[in-house]
Image (cartoon, grey):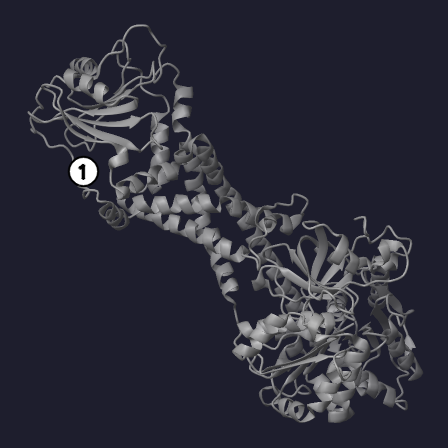
Amino acid sequence: MPDALHGGAIESRHDHLLPPQLRASADDAPQTRQLAAPQQQRRHWSWKQVWFQLHWFIGITAGTVLVIIGLSGATLAFKDELLDLMNPGVRHVAVETRTPLTPAQLSNIAAAEHGQRVASITMYAEAGAAPRLFFAPKNGQRRGESIYLHPYTGATQPALAGAEFFEWTESLHRWLLLPRDPGRQVAGALALCLLGLALSGLYLRWPRRPLDWRTWLTFDPALKGRSFLWNLHAVAGTWCLVVYVALTLTGIYWSYDVVRDNIDAWAGKPPRMAQAPAKKGGGKAPAVDISLAWTSFQLHAAGWTLASVRLPTRAGEAVQFTWLASDAPHERARSRMSIAPADGTLTESEPYSQQALGSRLVNIIYPLHMGTYFGLPGRIIVTVASLGLPLFAITGWMLYLGRRKAKRAVQAQRAMLGAGAQGKTPGTDSGLPTLVAYASQSGQAERLALESARALQQAGVAVDVQSLDRFDPAQLRQYQRALIVASTFGEGEAPDGTRRFARLLQQTSGMPLAGLGFGMLALGDRHYSAFCGFGHALAQQLQALGATSLFPLIEVDKHDPAALAGWSTALARCSGSAIDAIGVQEEASYADWRLARRVLLNPGSQGGELHEITLTGPADAIWEAGALAEIIPCNADGSDGDGSHPDSAHHAPRSYSLASLPSDGEVQLLVRQERHAGEENQGHGLASGWLTRFAPLGSPIRLRLQANPAFAPALVDVPCIYIGNGSGLAGLRAHLRARQRAGLARNWLLFGERQQAFDSVCGAELQGWLDTGHLARLDKVFSRDGERQYVQDRLRASANELREWLAQGAIVYVCGSLQGMATGIDAVLQELLGQEGLDALLAAGRYRRDVY
């Protein structure tokens, strides 16, 4: 059973990942090397980790500037409505009974009043809408001025208040107030960054089964802290993803001439000509009466809503009309028409529906970018998505700063613990340093010991931090005081790595320890009959050798804050100074995950139902193969399972081996449904019943990830032997997935179940690994098919192959039931290697177990 306390970031030692020929002697390695080893962990990054690093780097750099583009774009989305609100009676006047003026009349009035040549005029079929008139550019200008005219009198309307602000905003949005050409390219680069953020976010969120829409689109407002930020960031990003892809692709069209020119050429549009300033002395355009042309246009363009009339610049030139029909699919779906001004003859007509497909597709770019292609709903969606960019920038920065803060805290703690491990911390003690030792299976006891050592350092006590894995009992005589954090494994046993120390201590009955005072913090699980058994046995043996207990042994079941407070008080008495509470802050590390799927893997099996449980949660959740998920269960009716029952121990958190990796995008567990007599929870186990039967899909599951360094993965080129049964395949599957993604193929799997017909759990995945060579050997053992045989029997029968693999530096992993399978594997290894050989295998970290 793993240590009873606390998940979170647990430091581990990885020297034992190397085969003997590559590993320094464990006896010569200083303790500081053990503490610094986490800094030397593997450098293998998965593609998902690479994309995650790129995602956050672009997000905190370009994302900040994208906020400006998003806010300015949202402002421009409803520019016309805002201008009309700020300028009542300018672009729309009261409807009158008299006939509106024609383009010819309006252009004559404006030319006479302003003394400028009229280049074009835009007419609106809507009653009361003011036509917009454009003058020809003056000398040195790229484009001429525009004015709105009263549709019934021809009088020039007042200038639009706020128009300059929106022009400035458009310049900010399109080229960030930079000179036009470099500004467009910078904006285009930012658009590419947004596209990269959107697509990398999609990749990072991609689950194993992407058809579950709840995983993609469901936001949980009940989440707290970092989980809330990640859920908001990821789900909102998914909702906006399609919009951002459309905005960026259309924005790139205007940002880079090479893109625009190639698309226009494909569409059959004529090449764009650089617009040069008007030259002085260019001559005046001939006075042309366009009345007949306007009458002819109205005759041929029934149902028009908007018409842009371009006046001739040379004699004999036709009047050009670009117009929008009432049934046009979008605002840029404009037809073209040319009419001779002399007699109103139609010389050219090109309805939008008859234009080339490429040209029509290009005309969609602007409506897609503005959202107008989908009408008012589309504009609202674009606006909301644009306003979402500040949200992503803020949440991204908060998550980034949180990671930085946590990283600095870990580095600081590691530095302090490293100093403490060398016994160099100055203090008021003038004697020998206090030994702070730990016996840890999953890393919990180690973390508590390190935290205790740091607290003692801060109180001025010199400490020496040691793991009992490589500690010789004779060294106890070097200390006057020892504080030991001891985890119990299984039914009162020592953790795997501490078995050698426990055996040697039992054999040193004649060694006097009369000068040693010790304190014991024993970790355990009340579900087991030998609660805190190893801690008690260790304390009894130390007392039998003459050591004196400084205070009564303190038992801790799971997260008992009262027991931890007692330990902190005991440390305070030992140091003579106040000690902050040890370990209790870890309770806040639980987060709400969501039950996404459960799949029965063994229908018809003689054993209990085995389910694959899939949970989704924070997108930044990180763990490694071998880690555990600690879950607080609920009763069958959904009520809290951690306090409502009179027997509070019955509701303690349950630990399950993780069967997946962060790159899978979800937590997967293999959970055996436990059944028992009684009416409570309808005869189902509390945690297994909740996960496999009663919890509704989508319901929150209180979970925290727990490191398990004693079952750490071997991601270096050494052989690995994986042995397990039943739900123990979960931890082994995660290891094999990690090895596959690291390109490591010297793997041997021995797996046992009842019947091949019903219990071939994950059979397709295992067979696929064997076919591709990822598994060098696969032994499936089914105890109820033919001759009754178990995995330990198959391992004993393969003794020669086992010796060969161990000689090559193989690491043995065992995951599954302690009684029967794990005990049997232990016996086989002891037969093959002898007790000393088995102890050496344990001390080298080459025999790793996660059994229950």
x, y percentage for residue 625?
63, 70
Of 305 and 315, nearer the camera is 305
Characterize the local packing of mark 1: few (<14), some (14-19) or many (20 or more) Cα atoms within 10 angstroms. Answer: few
> For mark 1, what is the residue?
275
Q: Mark 1: which amino acid? A: Gln
x, y percentage for residue 159?
31, 19
Of 606 and 540, nearer the camera is 606
Count all numbered tags in the image, as a single digit.
Answer: 1
Q: Does 729 sit above or below residue 28?
A: above
Q: Does 178 sit above or below residue 352?
A: below
Residue 105 vs residue 573: left or right?
left
The part of the image, by quadrant, that contains residue 421 is bottom right
Q: Does 667 sit above or below residue 768?
A: above
x, y percentage for residue 412?
63, 64
x, y percentage for residue 172?
36, 38
Of 13 and 251, nearer the camera is 251
Label 1: which secondary element: loop
Residue at image point 33% right, 39% down:
364
Residue at image point 84% right, 79% down:
480
Of 715 and 390, nearer the camera is 715
Quarter the C terminus occupies? bottom right
The part of the image, by quadrant, that contains residue 89 is top left
Residue 557 vs residue 147: left or right?
right
